[in-house]
Amino acid sequence: MAQEHSKRTGPDLAEGVALAALPDGAKLVGHVGDSRVLLVRHGAEIYAIAAECTHYSGPLVDGLVVEDTIRCPWHHACFDLRTGEALRAPALSPVACWSVTQRDGKVFVGEKKAAPTRPPRGVIENAPGKIVIVGGGAAGFAAAQQLRRADYQGSIVMLSNDEALPVDRPNLSKDYLAGTAPEAWMPLRSGGFYAKNGIDVWLGADATGVDLRSREVRLANGSSVPYDRLLLATGAEPVRLSIPGADLPHVRTLRSLADCRAIIDLAGTARRAVVMGASFIGLEVAASLRARGIEVDVVAPEARPMERVLGPQLGDFIRSLHEEHGVVFHLEDTAIAIDGKQVKLKGGDTLEADLVVLGVGVRPRIRLAEAAALTVDRGVVVDAYLETSVPGIFAAGDIARWPDPRGGDAIRVEHWVVAERQGQTAALNMLGYREKHTAIPFFWSRHYDLRINYVGHAEAWDTLEIDGEIAARDCSLLFKRRDRTLAVATIRRDIESLEAEVKMERDAAA
């Protein structure tokens, strides 16, 4: 989450800095009053914007300038240097901008500019009167916000089967679970945001069907909600194990804020925990529980953690990193029963566990789409505009299978940033703007003090090229098929990650 910074660092930009100190492409952090400000020179233009990303306060000085935008090095948010507008998730709020003048060979930063006014996208003909969004996660929230950013004046109803307003889900397995982030950081927006923007959020609303003829969404309580355009953003649900004891109260999955609260409550008295699954979520949970001083065993059927996504070398390194922090792995093994506070493994071991967290994967929630006879294929099939096989119904997020903009088969990706960006694109297309979803998939994972960035999508590869040293935490991994780079994973090479994203975007547009 963005934080306020008042420490004065660097030169006082109101007093001016020498133009010669800003060659083309240069970035310089200074201050104006108590505000940290970043000067960026791109060609003849010089811009002044807030120095931190509005997502997690990433240092924009370490980011990448692409034409008249700047991208955050941490999680690939993108801002307009001219206006400060947040152009891409995961940042959902603009950065502040200041006026800039030049005289006598110096650059001066003046007054803070007013919040940007967005240029109109054009007249919306036959705008829908009522848009219904099913889902209160990343895609659903981003779509609702984007609709209002696009000056849509009609009705927006968000149906969420959760009991909490949309939250920052990546933090559930990271800082919030570890106890280093307060709950106040978790909501993507306060309740006042929805009221102010006329977004009608129905919590605890379980959608059970879509009537295509009457254009209504039916709810479990017997009511229905009419729509002119419909967005399905139902996300994914955790897989539960069908073994004895899997329904015991100390056996939990992690998907919602309520799930995380329950785990934190159990962690308050737990001495030992077992995490089922060596996935990103499972190992992030393991790291967070270790931060609370809990002994952790990880049980997984694969030979290496994350090998399917990151390859054997990085998988081995991640295992060793967790072992250095005291995690004990039981790989190539599975649980066959949970008997009270004991987890029995197929290999014969028995593990003590005051808390068991299931991180064995998720499955897309496509029941609503199936019942409405939408085309499904391991997800809800959509076109490049995120529209389903039924006109007027769109899908985004974990359920959507869309055409890979770089060619090849359609893909479905369960990443937070992907879901947010798809929600933004789907919102515009529900208004008739016909914008293709071309954003390159991106995700990040954090383990203790290690952050891994991953851009692109590689379900299979024939070559894995490693530049640098994984053990030194300074490396890039290129996942290739037939000499074509499908994805790039990096550690401490943020600019390389951003450059890979830009290259992939340009290759897709070629």
Image: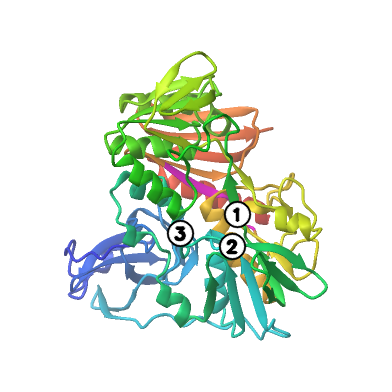
Task: Specify the label residue 364 is tagged with.
Answer: none
Q: Are marks 1 and 2 in contact (CB under 8 Å)?
A: yes
Which residue type does callout 2 highlight?
Answer: Gly
Which residue type does callout 1 highlight?
Answer: Gly
Q: Which residues are magenta?
A: 438-445
Give the CA separation, mark 1 to mark 3. 22 Å
Binning the other alpha carbons within 10 Å of mark 2 as few (below 14), some (14 to 19) or many (20 upward) gives many
Give the CA separation, mark 2 to mark 3. 23 Å
Residue 442 drawn in magenta: yes
| SS at mark 2 in the image | loop
Quarter assignment of residue 419: bottom right
Q: Is residue 110 above or below residue 393?
A: below
Identify the residue under disc 3.
Answer: 77
Between circles 1 and 3, the one closer to the viewer is: 1
Question: In this rendering, does residue 29 appear at all?
Answer: yes
* Placement of the N terminus among the 4 image quadrants: bottom left
Binning the other alpha carbons within 10 Å of mark 1 as few (below 14), some (14 to 19) or many (20 upward) gives many
Which residue type does callout 3 highlight?
Answer: Ala
Q: Is residue 174 above or below residue 34?
A: above
Identify the residue under disc 2.
Answer: 135
* Placement of the C terminus among the 4 image quadrants: bottom right
